[in-house]
């Protein structure tokens, strides 16, 4: 099996989330929250890759692909406020990971340009 970028990204995210969940007391609800954030990260990771492909097309077939980033930032801002109010630390760390992810992908694509097939 070839180790892919998304494997490493996912492992880092789950490691950070698990560490925060355990350091914040390891209550079952915190573990559930960390798992939910981890699965949401997997979904977001795929969405970012799909949006990258769509943006690279000469004529996009999904014309609203640009809205993906706007919705993403707006939802993370609202989740941040909500999680701070609840004291949901794993989820709050997840917000930070989610917000850092587009910056990471931009850097990754700069050093590993996408090949169009």
Image (spheres, grey):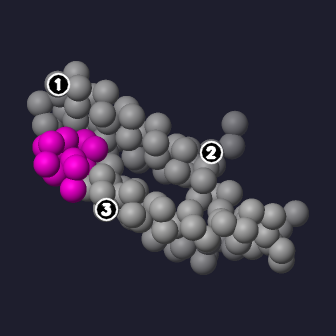
Quick one: SS at disc 3? helix
Side of 110 where 116 appears, left or right: right
Give the class, few, some or many, for how many residues have Cα within 10 Å of label 1's Cα (few <14, many ≥20).
few
**In this orientation, does residue 52 appear?**
no
**Which disc number belongs to residue 92?**
none
In the rendered image, residue 75, in percent from the top left (x then y), is placed at: 39, 57
Instruction: Measure how far apart labels 2 and 1 are at the Cα level.
Output: 32 Å
Quick one: SS at disc 2? loop
**At 30% from the left edge and 57% from the top edge, which residue is drawn?**
78
In the depicted view, which residue is nearer to us: 105 or 84? 84
Q: Which range is magenta?
A: 81-92
Q: Earlier in the sequence, mark 1 or mark 3?
A: 1
**At 42% from the left edge and 39% from the top edge, which residue is drawn?**
38
Of labels 2 and 1, the one closer to you? 1
Quick one: SS at disc 1? loop
In the rendered image, residue 5, in percent from the top left (x then y), is placed at: 59, 53
**At 64% from the left edge and 58% from the top edge, which residue is drawn?**
49
| Residue that protrudes farthest toward the right in the picture | 117
Side of 31 where 75 appears, left or right: right
In the depicted view, which residue is nearer to us: 101 or 5? 101
Q: Where, quadrant-wise, is the N terminus in this rendering?
A: top right
| Residue that protrudes farthest toward the top in the picture | 28
Q: Mark 1 sits on what residue?
A: 27
Q: Earlier in the sequence, mark 2 or mark 1?
A: 2
Dominant secondary structure of the magenta stretch?
helix
Q: Where, quadrant-wise, is the C terminus in this rendering?
A: bottom right
In the depicted view, which residue is nearer to us: 34 or 15? 34
In the rendered image, residue 43, in percent from the top left (x then y), is placed at: 54, 44
**Which disc number belongs to residue 77?**
3
Q: Mark 2 sits on what residue?
A: 3
**At 60% from the left edge and 53% from the top edge, which residue is drawn?**
47
């Amino acid at each position: 099996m070839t180790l892919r970028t998304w494997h490493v990204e996912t492992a880092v995210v789950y490691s950070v989330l698990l560490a925060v969940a355990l350091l914040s007391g390891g209550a079952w609800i915190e573990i559930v929250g960390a798992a939910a954030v981890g699965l949401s990260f997997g979904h977001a990771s795929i969405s970012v890759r799909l949006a990258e492909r769509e943006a690279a097309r000469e004529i996009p077939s999904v014309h609203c692909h640009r809205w993906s980033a706007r919705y993403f930032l707006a939802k993370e801002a609202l989740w941040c406020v909500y999680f701070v109010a609840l004291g949901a630390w794993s989820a709050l760390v997840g917000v930070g990971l989610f917000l850092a992810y587009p910056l990471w992908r931009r850097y990754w694509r700069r050093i590993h340009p996408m090949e169009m097939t």
